[in-house]
């Protein structure tokens, strides 16, 4: 028969486990929801990524990455963090500022979405690699060559608004799974133990 002291010990132990589980869930929730890709350009400049979460593309929902002279002709890894994938509808990558005064050669590859998976069994990273058929250059970008994981393009001289559009409506972005149940189930068992202790 379990004594009251033993129940108190189990309750304290479960309380500590619940605290650790909840902290782990919260900290993992805030990490690693990101878009990552590699890009190479023949000119330096500011690369801009716009995200459409239902308000179209706008100056508020954007991230600017500067590619200086040292990056020219080199593969550069770009990583952009998001709070959540759930509301993303479209992405737009502007490789250079809105006006290009000369022809620019460029390539983009290894586009992938990253997040943390939460299951009963593990806390592991998940990713979705994007096929280049889902990347659509506008008419100011000329496609030179396209494979499943790389797109070579050319920004035409005097282009006023060159960009790459990535529609997300048909993609199954990696999302969080059942990990939220871990702290909930722990709390439920904890309350059950507390009730048993109080009845003793």
Image (cartoon, rainbow, N blue to C red):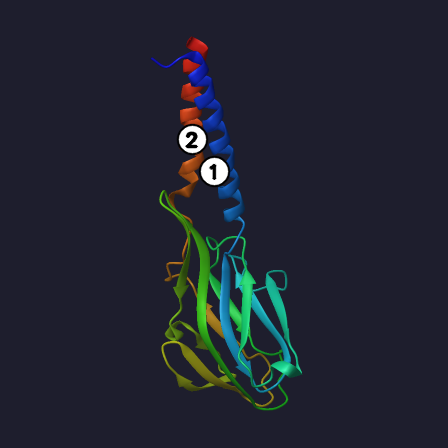
Earlier along the polypeptide chain: callout 1 or callout 2? 1
**Label ID, residue 21:** 1
Crowding near the residue tagged with mark 1, few <14, some 14–19, many ≥20 C-alpha atoms within 10 Å: some
Crowding near the residue tagged with mark 2, few <14, some 14–19, many ≥20 C-alpha atoms within 10 Å: some
Q: Which residue is mark 2?
A: 186
Residue 47 against residue 63 in the figure, above or below: below
Instruction: State the image quarter where residue 156 is shown.
Output: bottom right
x and y percentages locating residue 97 in the rendered image? 63, 78
User: Left or right: 78 with respect to 200?
Assistant: right
Q: What is the CA distance from the residue labelled 1 to the residue labelled 2?
A: 8 Å
Instruction: State the image quarter where residue 182 is shown.
Output: top left
Residue 16 against residue 195 in the figure, above or below: below
The answer to whether the residues at label 1 and label 2 have Cβ atoms under 8 Å apart is: yes
Instruction: State the image quarter where residue 14 is shown.
Output: top left
Q: Residue at x 47, y 18 (%)?
A: 8
Residue 81 or 47: which is nearer the viewer? 81
**Label ID, residue 189:** none
User: Left or right: 163 with respect to 60?
Assistant: left
């Amino acid at each position: 028969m379990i004594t009251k002291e033993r129940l108190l010990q189990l309750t304290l132990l479960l309380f500590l486990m619940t605290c650790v589980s909840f902290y782990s869930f919260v900290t993992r929730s805030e990490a690693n929801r990101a878009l990552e890709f590699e890009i190479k350009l023949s000119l330096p400049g500011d690369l801009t990524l716009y995200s459409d979460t239902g308000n179209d593309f706008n100056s508020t929902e954007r991230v600017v990455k500067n590619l200086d002279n040292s990056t020219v002709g080199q593969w550069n890894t770009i990583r952009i963090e998001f709070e959540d994938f759930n509301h993303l509808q479209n992405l737009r990558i502007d490789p250079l500022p809105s006006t290009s005064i000369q022809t620019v050669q460029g390539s983009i590859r290894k586009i992938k979405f990253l997040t943390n998976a939460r299951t009963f069994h593990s806390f592991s990273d998940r990713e979705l690699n994007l096929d280049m058929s889902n990347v659509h250059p506008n008419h100011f970008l000329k496609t030179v060559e396209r494979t499943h994981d790389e797109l070579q393009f050319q920004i035409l001289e005097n282009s006023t608004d060159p960009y790459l559009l990535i529609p997300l409506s048909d993609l199954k972005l990696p999302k969080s799974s059942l990990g939220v149940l871990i702290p909930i189930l722990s709390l439920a068992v904890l309350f059950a133990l507390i009730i048993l202790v109080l009845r003793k």
